[in-house]
Image: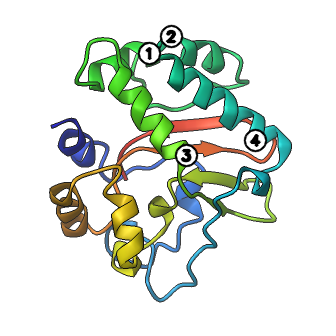
């Protein structure tokens, strides 16, 4: 149920940086299959050291089972990472409210699953370069191979995928970290 709710939320808006780099020639601003596909990165060593460190800290917080550990990381950022389009109020309480369990452990599991998967670099060579997990967020759904669809189904169900196809783009959670290690967002929607 959470995944269906989130897939339908925040439609028509995206985080402030990454959406500018998607090849938005497709319907609903989705990446176009005619545009060159971004390179899928998988190894932590493909990240700059600062981004590696932030990813590790986020994964440690997620593995702790304590959503409040994310607050510490949020508070350390120059600007709070986006968890919603608009003002969600307290970001930790907002994430807890999205979770099917009262403690927010489902949200932590989603964060961990995202950060363990493949990612892409968008805006390479610009001041707004950004690493985005999962790479599906920057790929046209119809361009995913059979192997990539199996990988996608570790995050969501076939029914969720059908809903996303109807909308025209990936709409589940995504994470953004800059090359210099700033955590910009952990949100759902497109």
Residues tagged 3 and 1 counted as in contact (Cβ below 8 A): no
Separation of residues labelled 3 and 1 (CA atoms): 22 Å
Q: Give the labeled residue for mark 2.
A: 68
Q: Residue at x 41, y 69 (%)?
A: 148
Residue farthest toward the right in the current orientation of the protein:
49
Residue that protrudes farthest toward the bottom in the picture: 34
In the rendered image, residue 5, in percent from the top left (x then y), is placed at 19, 39
Given contact means CB atoms under 8 Å apart, are the residues at marks 3 and 4 in contact? no
Confirm whether residue 143 shows in the render. yes
Name the residue that disc number 3 marks: 116
Q: Which residue is mark 4?
A: 52
Which image quarter: residue 108? top left
Q: Earlier in the sequence, mark 2 or mark 1?
A: 2
- Residue 92 has which mark? 1
Specify the color scheme: rainbow
Q: In the image, which is nearer the foreground, mark 3 or mark 4?
A: 3
Nearest the eye: 133 or 80: 133
Do callouts 2 and 1 mark residues in contact (Cβ within 8 Å)? yes
Q: Position of residue 145 (x, y in %)?
A: 39, 79
x, y percent for residue 19: 52, 58
Q: Position of residue 86 (x, y in %)?
A: 42, 31
Is tag 4's residue or tag 1's residue first in the polypeptide sequence?
A: 4
**Left or right position of 151 against 165:** right
CA gap between label 3 and label 4 equals: 12 Å
């Amino acid at each position: 149920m959470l995944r269906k709710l989130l897939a339908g939320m925040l439609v028509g808006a995206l985080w402030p940086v990454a959406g500018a780099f998607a090849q938005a020639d497709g319907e609903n601003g989705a990446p176009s299959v005619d545009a060159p596909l971004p390179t899928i990165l998988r190894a932590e060593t493909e990240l700059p050291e600062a981004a590696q460190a932030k990813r590790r800290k986020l994964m440690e917080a997620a593995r702790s089972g304590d959503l409040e550990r994310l607050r510490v990381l949020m508070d350390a950022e120059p600007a709070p990472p986006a968890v919603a389009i608009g003002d969600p109020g307290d970001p930790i309480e907002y994430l807890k409210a999205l979770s099917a369990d009262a403690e927010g452990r489902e949200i932590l599991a989603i964060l961990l699953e995202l950060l363990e998967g493949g990612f892409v670099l968008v805006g390479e060579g610009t001041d707004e370069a950004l690493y985005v997990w999962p790479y599906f967020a920057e790929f046209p759904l119809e361009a995913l191979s059979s192997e990539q669809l199996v990988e996608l189904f570790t995050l969501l169900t076939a029914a969720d995928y059908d809903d996303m196809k109807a909308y025209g783009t990936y709409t589940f959670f995504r994470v953004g970290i800059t090359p210099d290690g700033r955590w910009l967002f952990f949100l759902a929607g497109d």
